[in-house]
Image (tube, helix red, strand yellow):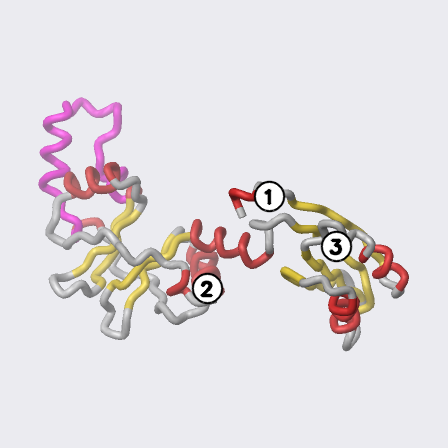
Amino acid sequence: MLIQELMTTEVKTVGADQSLLEIRELLLNHNLRRIPVVDSDGRLKGIITDGDVARATPSDASTLDRYEENYLLGKLKVKDLMTKAVVTVKAKDGVETAAYLMYKFKIGALPVVDDTNKVVGIISDTDLFKAFVGLLGYAKTSTKITIDTQDRVGVLADLTKIFKDNGINIISVLTRKIGPKRAAIAVRANLTGRMDIIQTIRDAGFVIIDISTTKVDDGDE
């Protein structure tokens, strides 16, 4: 899956010379946590977050009144607080690239830029969570069967053949090592009316260690 399939393309942006007072209102009014900073041609110059604005805002313990507070925020400019070294991705990068960068740098969103560094979108951790849920099949009524098996060549093919021979479409498959020579394989499929496949898997010599069904209302699928 590519980032362009998940990213938000209508991105709010600001200029480096705008005041923090403007940015605070923009963040609040549009329920945003961060805004890319661009030049007159839309090229990325930095990013400013609600955390940046919060750090610049006098605390409740301050003796400043609201007018004085707003005056100070009106004097501060985006360029005074924005992060200039921004981690970015391209629209045709895989979503795993975005996930890795967010994890590595502990950030919640990435601007998406083209080859000229112009902002064309933004992708957030919420977008990735949504994709993750969809890829694993959790957005559909389905049953996950987890199998403890030998980590050998062809074991996955043997298992999926059982589903194919029984006319059951697999939604997703995940594998992970659980020992030097063992692996856990989690197969998710819609087994409504076809729970007999479980015994068929056992009869083929596989050890099932977990079975769990996710129910999703028709309107949510």
Q: Secondary structure at mark 2?
A: helix
Amino acid of disc 2: Val
Query: Which residue in the structure is indicated by mark 2?
Result: 95
Amino acid of disc 3: Ile
Q: Secondary structure at mark 3?
A: strand
**Residue 56 sits inside the magenta stretch:** yes
Q: CA distance from mark 2 to mark 1?
A: 25 Å
Q: Secondary structure at mark 1?
A: loop
The 10 Å Cα crowd at callout 3, few under 14, some 14 to 19, many 20 or more, is some
| Label 3 vs 1, first from the N-terminus | 3
Magenta: predominant secondary structure element? helix
Amino acid of disc 1: Val
Residue 138, percent across and down? 59, 50
Residue 154, percent across and down? 77, 76
Q: CA distance from mark 3 to mark 1?
A: 17 Å
Query: Which residue in the structure is indicated by mark 3?
Result: 145
| Residue for point 25% across, 23% down | 61
Q: Are circles 2 and 3 on residues that touch, CB within 8 Å? A: no
Quadrant of the image occupied by residue 30: top left
Q: In the image, is 83 to the left or to the right of 164?
A: left
Residue 96, percent across and down? 49, 64
Residue 180 visible in the displayed image: no
74, above or below 6, in the image: above
| Residue for point 43% across, 62% down | 98
Query: Which residue in the structure is indicated by mark 1?
Result: 216
The 10 Å Cα crowd at callout 1, few under 14, some 14 to 19, many 20 or more, is few
What span is colored magenta in the figure? 52-79
Q: Are circles 3 and 1 on residues that touch, CB within 8 Å? A: no
| Label 2 vs 3, first from the N-terminus | 2
Foreground tag (2 vs 3): 3
**Residue 81 sits inside the magenta stretch:** no
